[in-house]
Image (cartoon, grey):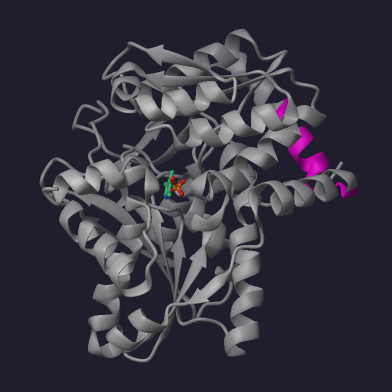
């Protein structure tokens, strides 16, 4: 067996395992398998092959010349938007999908909000020939018909959830219920660095490829570390993936950008770290959007991927220790970032990633930051957001 996990499921006091007792054996089985295979030669050779030839890694670290000139900084984009299925999510679904296969599981389940993680899971189910079922709130099924069709094309079954607000958090609850009933055969493939241990550490591991490539590439191009790394934060997986390799480089400023929605204090926000308080959601202790009596509040963001009332526990830890800073960008500012990158660089970002771009602009405009070298993690491409953006722009 591999090394004992360094964090033991805790990031400071955050994280942990807050689940019904029936799930503990499944989480233990998963942790043991993960620790066994994460350093296994055969497993990693197979995963690397899929990452390269199926998903399209390595992704470029692209110097955004026009934007850099406009803003007076050196801006690099980590091009996760170029990956198969359009975002970084495939790094994690390939990793966990392959792990499930090595564990002998014969069924994958997943949750999805707008459908991005559902699609990334469905294609991996097809690739690895593991039957896949995706829980999706009935509201989301209605709003995202095209993505439902995409999942079904790859032979995944989409299961609408009619509980609660009929959105992502309800789909996650339903997936946990399914898993409890079917732990023998089934792997629950969680889509971000959230949930009970070992998920936050495991998803971070599979997404850390973003940071590993970035570190190598920035040395090749600049001969030094970047001054600043900026990434959007929903559940927190693309950001922790890139941050992970720079946590010990104290001089590298790490900035996570949450979906501010209509504004952090508007009551319509997805900015969990800015507007939330400590609480337990979906199996771990972290920051949560909740009422005084602990009821989970609806999150709101123009981008589906940032529209989650929780956040991965390691981000709570990085926030309270001050190692990373977390800021919020409103819907309106994100749309500005979306247009900015499209116009200046010919790259149409996902609305989630547009939050990071919008903050990079704000940051670069600050006199203190002139001339800095900034890496923006471009977590995904904007094709999926065309209809929303067209509507907001009045087209
Ligand atoms: C899902 C998604 C996100 C948010 O998820 P994280 O786990 O916070 O990375 C960000 N960007 C894109 C393009 C997404 O699809």
Pinpoint residue 346: horizontal percent, then vertical percent.
37, 68
Task: Identify which residue, 55 or 161, lies in the foreground.
Answer: 55
Span colored in magenta: 29-41
Q: Is residue 368 left or right of residue 151?
A: left
Pinpoint residue 1: horizontal percent, then vertical percent.
87, 41
Task: Identify which residue, 263 or 18, lies in the foreground.
Answer: 263
Q: Is residue 4 visible?
A: no
Vertical order, 42 against 195 (above or below): below
Residue drawn at x 33%, y 88% is: 69
Residue drawn at x 47%, y 35% is: 284
Q: Is residue 392 visible?
A: yes
Residue drawn at x 16%, y 56% is: 332
Q: Judge whether residue 306 is colored magenta.
A: no
Q: Judge whether residue 36 is colored magenta.
A: yes
Vertical order, 395 against 23 (above or below): below
Where is residue 143, by image quadrant? top left
Where is residue 355, by image quadrant? bottom left
Give the residue at the far front of this rendering.
395
Give the residue at the far top of this rendering.
181
Residue drawn at x 56%, y 76% is: 249
How many marks the image carries: the answer is 0
Predominant SS of the magenta segment: helix
Pinpoint residue 22: horizontal percent, then vertical percent.
60, 13
Task: Identify which residue, 58 or 196, lies in the foreground.
Answer: 58
Q: Is residue 143 left or right of residue 285?
A: left
């Amino acid at each position: 067996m591999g090394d004992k996990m360094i964090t033991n499921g805790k990031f400071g006091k955050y994280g942990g395992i807050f689940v019904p007792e029936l799930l503990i054996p499944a989480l233990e089985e998963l942790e043991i398998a993960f620790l066994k295979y994460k350093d296994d030669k055969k497993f990693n050779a197979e995963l690397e092959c899929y990452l390269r030839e199926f998903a399209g890694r390595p992704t470029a670290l692209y110097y955004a010349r026009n934007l850099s000139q406009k803003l007076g900084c050196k801006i690099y984009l980590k091009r996760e938007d170029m990956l198969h299925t359009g975002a970084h999510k495939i790094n994690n679904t390939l990793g966990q999908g392959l792990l499930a296969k090595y564990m002998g599981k014969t069924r994958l389940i997943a949750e999805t909000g707008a459908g991005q993680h559902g699609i990334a899971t469905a294609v991996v189910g097809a690739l690895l020939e593991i039957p896949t079922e995706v829980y999706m709130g009935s509201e989301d099924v209605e709003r995202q018909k095209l993505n439902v069709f995409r999942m079904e094309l790859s032979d995944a079954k989409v299961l609408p959830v009619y509980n609660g607000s009929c959105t992502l958090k309800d789909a996650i609850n339903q997936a946990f219920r399914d898993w409890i009933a079917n732990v023998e055969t089934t792997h629950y493939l969680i889509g971000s660095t959230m949930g009970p241990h070992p998920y936050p550490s495991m998803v971070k591991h599979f997404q850390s490829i973003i940071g590993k490539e970035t570190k190598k590439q920035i040395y090749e191009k600049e001969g030094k570390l970047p001054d600043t790394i900026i990434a959007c934060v929903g559940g927190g997986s693309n950001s922790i993936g890139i941050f992970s390799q720079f946590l010990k480089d104290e001089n590298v400023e790490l900035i996570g950008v949450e979906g501010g929605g209509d504004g952090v204090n508007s009551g319509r926000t997805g900015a969990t770290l800015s507007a939330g308080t400590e609480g337990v959601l979906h199996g771990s202790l972290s920051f949560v959007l909740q009422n005084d009596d602990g009821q989970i509040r609806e999150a709101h963001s123009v981008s589906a991927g940032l529209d989650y009332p929780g956040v991965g526990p390691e981000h709570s830890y990085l926030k309270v220790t001050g190692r990373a800073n977390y800021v919020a960008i409103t819907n309106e500012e994100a749309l500005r970032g979306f247009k900015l990158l499209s116009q200046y660089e010919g790259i149409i970002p996902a609305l989630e990633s547009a939050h990071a771009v919008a903050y990079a602009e704000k940051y670069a405009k600050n006199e203190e930051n002139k001339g800095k070298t900034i890496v923006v993690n471009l977590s995904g491409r904007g094709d999926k957001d065309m209809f929303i953006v067209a509507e907001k722009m009045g087209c």
